Image: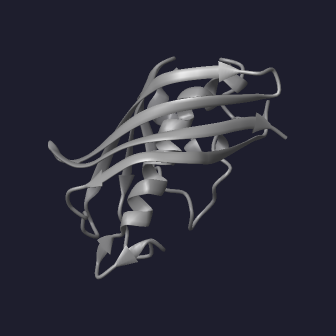
Amino acid sequence: MDISSLDISNFLPHRDPMLMVTSVLEIDENSVSTQFHISEDCVFLKDAKLSETGLIENAAQAASGIVGQTFFEKDDVEGTGNKLVGYISAIKKVEIFELPKVGETIITKAKLISRFDTGEMTMCSLEAETFVAEKLIVSSTMNFLIHEV
C-alpha cells in the first residue's frame, strides 16, 4: 500500500479547519513523519505565520497517529473500523524557535517514548520535532490519552 495515497482525515477525528496534517510521509509502530502545508485560510494564523497554538496542534495530531494506528486493522485504508478520541493530557515541554509563514510546508517527526494500555484506553508519551526545510522550529514532549468511542 502506498502511504501517500491515504486520506489522513479518515484516521483523525479533526476536520477542516482544525485538521493540521496534510499527509503522512512515513509511519511505523514507534514513529511518524507528516507534512502540513500552511495555507492562507488556516485558522491558526497570526500575522501571516502559523501561531504557537497551531504548531502545538500540528505536533499533537502528527504524534497521535503512532498509537492511533494500532486501533485499526492493517487493511482498513478507509479508516472505518474504529472511532477514536484522543486528548493531550499534559504538555511536558514545548520549545518554539521560529514561526513558519503562509505558503511554507512543515515536516513533523514524532516518536513514541512510552505506552501503557489499560484495555479501555491508552496512555502514552511522545516526542515531536517540527522542521521547515532542514531547520528545527519546534521541539515538544506531550502525554496523550486515546480511547475508542
- Name the residue at 35% across, 63% down: 38
Quadrant location, the C terminus: top right
- Name the residue at 72% across, 19% down: 73
Say if 105 sits above or below 140 in the image.
below
How far across and how far down the image is residue 95, in percent? 29, 52
Q: Nearer the viewer, residue 111 or 70?
A: 111
Which image quarter: residue 24? top left
Which image quarter: residue 4? top left
How far across and how far down the image is residue 134, in percent? 14, 42
- Name the residue at 48% across, 28% down: 3
Say if 113 sits above or below 108 in the image.
above
Left-right relation of 138 to 63: left
Q: Nearer the viewer, residue 107 or 97?
A: 97
Left-right relation of 34 to 60: left
How far across and how far down the image is residue 138, in percent? 28, 50
Q: How is the image coloured?
A: one colour
Q: Outermost residue, bottom direction?
A: 47
How far across and how far down the image is residue 104, in percent? 25, 60
Q: How many numbered circles are shown? A: 0
Say if 58 sits above or below 84 in the image.
below
- Name the residue at 37% across, 38% down: 128
